Image (tube, rainbow, N blue to C red):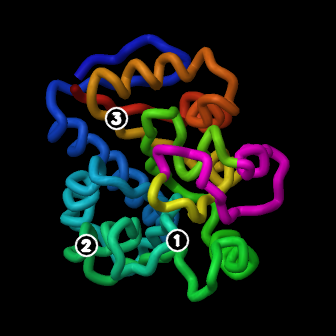
Amino acid sequence: MTASVTTFPLLSFASRPAAEAALADALEAGVREAHAMGRRARIALSGGSSPEPAYRAFAAKDLNWSQVDVALVDDRWVDVDQPGSNQAMIERAFAAADGVTIFGMKLPTESPKQAEAELDVVYRALRPFDAIVLGMGPDAHTASWFPASPDLVACLDPTGSATVLGIDASLAPVAAPYSERMTMTLPVVSEAQQILILLFGADKKQILQQALDAPVTHAPIKAAIEATGTRCVALWAD
């Protein structure tokens, strides 16, 4: 493992399994710290294919899972039994974590906008999170903060009161075919004890480094990095 000098810690690993193991270890440390303080641990996780092995490794840890809450950073507005559901992936990954509580975002409403108020109550009770895992897309989006979304400014408002927002991602090509999303907002991310960004491939590393010099409206991942500083750590492998 080597560290790269940038505005926040960027850790490079020799292999993807090594980066996945490091992510699992970091999440375990966050849970153990919360439990040592006599309270429930609260973790928020992103979806996608890259982090699932790390989540499985984390779920296999010998922890008091009955005192762990796992929430989603964002999700596509599809039922859990449909392709594209981040909740479905999280539930698969945590099959071995006996007693864990998983909070999904998809509610039985027609649109995510209609579910904002109900879900806001849930996330307000969960915050602040001990750790949040973020990913990053090829357009430098994270969570469901898409550069092309008309909801981006509201998501990134540091003084905003909303914990979650329904998202119109119809103008973001990388979001297709899932144009409706639900996501947590920047204020929730910014108050977390630790932000962990998992990245694979030389292209993603380059996108992340370029994002640091771009406006946050063009590279929303930068908003999370700026808001959390050294509490944000990127784990990268080729």
Q: Name the mark nearer the viewer: 3 or 1.
A: 1
Left or right side of 47 for 167 = right
Q: Residue at x 37, y 23 (%)?
A: 205
Residue 114 vertical position relative to residue 129 in the rendered view, above or below: below
* Residue 162 located within the stretch drawn in magenta: yes
Q: Nearer the viewer, residue 40 or 14?
A: 14
Residue denoted by label 1: 77
Q: Position of residue 159 (x, y in %)?
A: 84, 48
Q: Nearer the viewer, residue 161 or 208?
A: 208
Q: Secondary structure at mark 1?
A: loop
Q: Residue at x 75, y 77 (%)?
A: 117
Residue denoted by label 2: 92
* Residue 132 located within the stretch drawn in magenta: no
Q: Position of residue 193 (x, y in %)?
A: 56, 47
Residue range (magenta): 150-175
Q: Secondary structure at mark 3?
A: strand
Q: Residue at x 58, y 64 (%)?
A: 180
- Reading the chain from its start, which is encountered first: label 3 or label 1? 1
Q: Amino acid at mark 3?
A: Leu
Image quadrant where residue 120 sits: bottom right
Q: Is residue 194 visible?
A: no
Q: How many marks?
A: 3
Residue denoted by label 3: 199
Left or right side of 22 for 120 = right
Give the distance between the C-alpha atoms of the residues marked 3 and 1, in whole angstroms. 24 Å
- Reading the chain from its start, which is encountered first: label 3 or label 2? 2
